[in-house]
Image: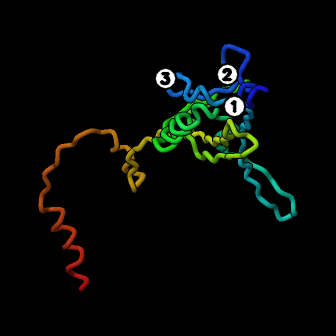
Amino acid sequence: MPNIFETLLPTHAYDQVAIFNQSFEQVFPRARTIKAIIKEEAKVMEHPLETGATIVDHRIILPVECELTMMLQAADYQDTYRQIKQLYLSAELLIVQTKSSVYYNQLISSMPHEENPEQYDAITLELGLKEAQFATTRFDYVPANPKQSSTVNRGTQQPKTTTQEPIRSAFSNFTGRF
């Protein structure tokens, strides 16, 4: 009678669902993915109206999440589990290939496993991955006074010398009022 892991061995030259590092080298090739759930979701912004109706004006695309059910063979499950844990702790970005698409910048977010006596020669691992999204930011100087906005890109300016005459004339307006 063949063991449970032999029934999961692929009949093709490559895995249908595989995980790669950034160099496109397959990581933990001895683990067999038996189920893949891909969550591509969006958060829809809803707002109530005075009439009781609800309007939807935009949505936010959430990071892609992958849940992979994997079987680890008893002969090398400790090495494979150790490799998965190392990638989990180092937060290395991975690439998940499925039949439908390729998902980049995936981090291992969870790795619970089940040790079941019915599967004496294998361990079932529920690998959770979540997409890391990176934002590029740009900072520009914005003056507090909009009238000064034309001075933003004028470069270095030389100071001008002032005379005392404008100051005396300003004080001369107040001397007769106190």
Assign a secondary structure to mark 1: strand
Residue at 76 percent across and 43 percent down: it is 118
Asked whether the residues under the numbered discs 1 and 2 touch, taking CB atoms below 8 Å apart as contact, a structural biologist would say yes
Q: Earlier in the sequence, mark 1 or mark 2?
A: 2
Q: For this rendering, which residue is in front, 49 or 119?
A: 119
Q: Is residue 129 left or right of residue 93?
A: right
The residue beneath circle 1 is 33
Q: Residues within 10 Å of mark 2 (few under 14, many from 20)?
A: some
The location of residue 80, given as percent across then percent down, is 55, 34
Name the mark on residue 77.
none
As measured in the structure, the alpha-carbon distance from the residue carrying label 1 to the one carrying label 2 is: 8 Å
Q: Is residue 80 left or right of residue 64?
A: left
The location of residue 20, given as percent across then percent down, is 56, 27
Assign a secondary structure to mark 3: loop
The residue beneath circle 3 is 23
Q: For this rendering, which residue is in front, 25 or 2?
A: 2
Amino acid bearing label 2: Asp
Asked whether the residues under the numbered discs 3 and 1 touch, taking CB atoms below 8 Å apart as contact, a structural biologist would say no
Amino acid bearing label 3: Ser
As measured in the structure, the alpha-carbon distance from the residue carrying label 3 to the one carrying label 1 is: 21 Å
Q: Earlier in the sequence, mark 2 or mark 3?
A: 2
Amino acid bearing label 1: Thr
The N terminus sits in image quarter = top right
The residue beneath circle 2 is 15
Q: Is residue 108 left or right of residue 69?
A: left
Question: Disc 2 or disc 3, which is closer to the eye?
Answer: 2
Display colour scheme: rainbow
**Does residue 148 appear anywhere in the picture?**
yes
Residue at 74 percent across and 49 percent down: it is 44
Q: Is residue 26 above or below residue 163?
A: above
The location of residue 143, given as percent across then percent down, is 38, 52
